């Protein structure tokens, strides 16, 4: 399967909204069923210089793009934390396990390492999201701790791992 990675744009909001509300994705991010396209448009429109978002897109035979995943790198604004950033990622349910997540992670980590010179990149992941944890470990992230009852998911509290990748060069 061929897909491209590019920076996010406002026209991506409907596809991103679809992914965020999708069963098999929503449970592993902080999305909710009532989320609207306008919420996603607002998020994209209000991104500042510390927010870096990429999308994975496929193109149909008519040249129309469809977003199949996205990943963001958000550099912390505090002067004492400017060496660090947080990552968020999601992939359309139909395209999971096809290398989309890995390519998105490679893109944000290239930005972190080679353009922003970040030392610490961190994320959280539900402790039972084994596929995501394997990907993050493959990309050099290590578990630093457990955040207990971190979020509500399917009517119950869920724990998250705090994971980070530290550059030592």
Image: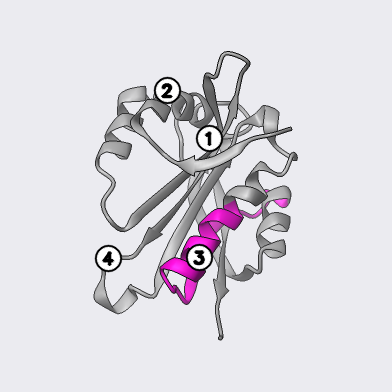
State whether residue 78 is above or below residue 72: below
Q: Quadrant of residue 145?
A: bottom right
Residue 6 in percent (x, y) is at: 49, 42
* First along the sequence among labels 1 and 3: 3
Whole-angstrom CA distance, mark 3 to mark 2, is: 27 Å
* First along the sequence among labels 2 and 1: 2
Please name the residue that numbered disc 1 is placed on: 155
Please name the residue that numbered disc 4 is placed on: 77
Numbered mark located on residue 14 in the image: 2
Which image quarter is the N terminus in? Answer: top right
State whether residue 139 is above or below residue 155: below
What are the residue bounds of the magenta stretch? Answer: 105-130
Question: How many neighbours does mark 4 have within 10 angstroms: few (below 14), some (14-19), or many (20 or more)?
Answer: some
Residue 138 in percent (x, y) is at: 72, 62
x 73%, y 49%: residue: 131
Do callouts 2 and 4 mark residues in contact (Cβ within 8 Å)?
A: no
* Snapshot colouring: one colour
x 37%, y 35%: residue: 9
Residue 115 in percent (x, y) is at: 43, 67
Please name the residue that numbered disc 3 is placed on: 122
Asked whether, in this view, residue 135 is left or right of residue 14, the answer is: right
Numbered mark located on residue 61 in the image: none
């Amino acid at each position: 399967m061929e897909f491209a990675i590019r920076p996010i744009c406002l026209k991506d909001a409907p596809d991103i909204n679809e992914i965020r509300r999708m069963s098999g994705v929503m449970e592993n991010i902080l999305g909710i069923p009532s989320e609207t396209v306008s919420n996603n448009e607002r998020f994209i429109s209000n991104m500042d210089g510390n927010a870096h978002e990429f999308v994975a897109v496929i193109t149909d035979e008519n040249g129309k793009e469809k977003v199949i995943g996205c990943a963001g790198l958000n550099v912390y604004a505090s002067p004492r934390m400017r060496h660090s950033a947080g990552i968020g990622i999601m992939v359309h349910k139909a395209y999971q396990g096809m290398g989309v997540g890995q390519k998105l992670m490679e893109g944000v980590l290239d930005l972190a390492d080679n353009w922003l010179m970040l030392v610490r990149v961190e994320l959280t992941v539900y402790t039972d999201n084994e596929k995501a944890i394997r990907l993050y470990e493959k990309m050099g992230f290590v578990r630093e701790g457990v955040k207990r009852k971190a979020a509500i998911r399917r009517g119950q509290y869920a724990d998250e791992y705090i994971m980070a990748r530290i550059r030592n060069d």
